Image (cartoon, grey):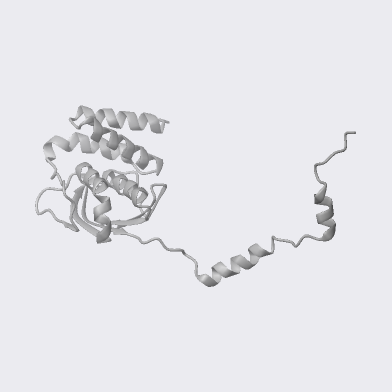
Amino acid sequence: MKSLSEIETISKRASRAKGFSWGTSEEIGKCIRLLELFSLPGLKNLSQYLKNYDQNNFKQLKLIAKNNNSDGKYHCPISTGVSFLDQIKILEKNNTIEFNKIAYPLLFLPFVSRASETLGKRILIKIDEKEFILNFNQSIFSNYSKNEIWENANNISINIMENANLFNNNEWNEMTKFEKETFVDESEELKEKSAGAGLTDND
């Protein structure tokens, strides 16, 4: 089994060989490492993407808006991902960002995961009929687990979720009651024993 370090290195070098800058290649390496860490087929999708990169001439998206549509070519997942991550602080105010037509959408996913960490907020992303919850770049929860090449997605919706507790005040107060039971009032006997604790007479 290949290590995550090996996966990141070969992804970075292969991307550089296809003409990406070293900076972008390093970003790609990190993202493929993340996908493989989360048991998603990153390397397989990157290999196919690089194989088809020249002939497809994907649309490069530099400035991300609230709604990002393409009537022709599919958006490049790498340039879209880099732009999204770079602009996430500005995009945060939109709450929801929409795309249509992203090629190899799994390659876009880890950029959004890293944006979740940058914001300190969970992000829900729907890619066609599949959903992914990105948890601060620590985990990905989804209804997708296929080991396959996912070439195109037509509808992508990103929702930046507000941080909120999953419990109510009553449940918190109940826990507080349990917590208080761990504290026992000191008896006079305990106080007397602790007063000389740790002292020895060496004379």
In the displayed structure image, the side of residue 87 where residue 177 appears, left or right: right
Q: How many marks?
A: 0
The answer to which image quadrant residue 14 occupies is top left
Kindly identify the residue that appears in the image at 88 percent across and 34 percent down.
Answer: 202
Question: Quadrant location of the C terminus?
Answer: top right
In the displayed structure image, the side of residue 157 where residue 75 appears, left or right: left
Q: Position of residue 198 (x, y in %)?
A: 80, 42
Question: Quadrant location of the N terminus?
Answer: top left
Decide: is 127 above or below 10: below
Kindly identify the residue that appears in the image at 37 percent across and 29 percent down.
Answer: 6
Q: Nearer the viewer, residue 154 or 8?
A: 8
Q: Nearer the viewer, residue 120 or 102?
A: 120
Kindly identify the residue that appears in the image at 20 percent across and 31 percent down.
Answer: 21
Could you tell me if residue 151 is visible in this image? no
Q: Nearer the viewer, residue 69 or 188?
A: 188
Kindly identify the residue that appears in the image at 64 percent across and 62 percent down.
Answer: 179
Q: Nearer the viewer, residue 189 or 4?
A: 189
The answer to which image quadrant residue 127 occupies is bottom left
Decide: is 31 above or below 70: above
Q: Position of residue 185 (x, y in %)?
A: 75, 62
Residue that lies at the very extreme toward the right in this rendered image: 203
Q: Position of residue 186 (x, y in %)?
A: 77, 60
Residue that lies at the very extreme toward the left in this rendered image: 72
Could you tell me if residue 81 is visible in this image? yes
Q: Position of residue 135 (x, y in %)?
A: 40, 52
In the displayed structure image, the side of residue 54 where residue 28 appears, left or right: right
Residue that lies at the very extreme toward the bottom in this rendered image: 170
